[in-house]
Image: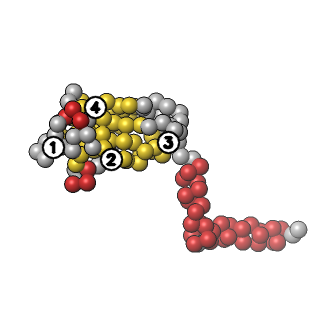
């Protein structure tokens, strides 16, 4: 193969890669690469307001704001999808309409959370991290 023909193939291959990255046919390439090199595991975390609190609280995960949907009555719970990375700590807050009443940190300590119910429970004495 001549040098000119080889150079032409290299240019065409590079062009094809650029089109693939920018084109609709390869939209999943970015998702594939992100999933392939991801170090965390997607886990459903149950946020629970214990029956013992006897009041409604906003039980909030990392980066969440208090909204009506996140207000939990005594004994209620909701689910939050989180990407847990072993060795990292995740901060949770309990709030009333006026102020923050508690902060807890749950460290991810498992290599796999498959088949495990992970929860964060707001109690009268603070947060409990269950199955972390």
Q: Secondary structure at mark 3?
A: loop
Q: Which mark is residue 126?
A: none
Residue 115 image position (x, y, % from top left): 52, 38
Q: Secondary structure at mark 4?
A: strand
Task: Check disc 3 and report the residue beneath it.
Answer: 40
Q: Are marks 1 and 3 in contact (CB under 8 Å)?
A: no
N-terminal of the pair, mark 2 or mark 3, is 3
N-terminal of the pair, mark 2 or mark 1, is 2
N-terminal of the pair, mark 4 or mark 3, is 3
Distance in Å between CA atoms under marks 1 and 4: 15 Å
Residue 59 image position (x, y, % from top left): 26, 43
N-terminal of the pair, mark 1 or mark 3, is 3
**Is the C terminus in the top left, top right, bottom left or bottom right quadrant?**
top left
Q: Which mark is residue 127?
A: 4
Q: Secondary structure at mark 2?
A: strand
Dot 2 crowding, Cα within 10 Å, few <14, some 14–19, many 20+: some
Q: Residue furthest left?
A: 98
Residue 87 in view, yes or no: no
């Amino acid at each position: 193969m001549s040098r000119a023909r080889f150079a032409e193939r290299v240019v065409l291959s590079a062009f094809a890669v650029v089109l693939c990255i920018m084109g609709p046919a390869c939209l999943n390439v970015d998702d594939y690469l992100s999933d392939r090199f991801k170090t965390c595991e997607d886990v459903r975390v149950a946020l629970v307001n214990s029956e013992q609190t006897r009041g409604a609280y906003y039980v909030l995960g990392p980066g969440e704001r208090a909204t009506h949907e996140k207000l939990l009555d005594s004994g209620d719970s909701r689910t939050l999808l989180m990407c847990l990375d072993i060795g990292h700590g995740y901060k949770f807050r309990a709030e009333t309409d006026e102020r923050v009443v508690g902060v807890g940190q749950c460290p991810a300590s498992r290599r796999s959370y498959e088949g495990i119910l992970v929860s964060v429970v707001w109690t009268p004495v603070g947060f409990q991290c269950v199955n972390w």
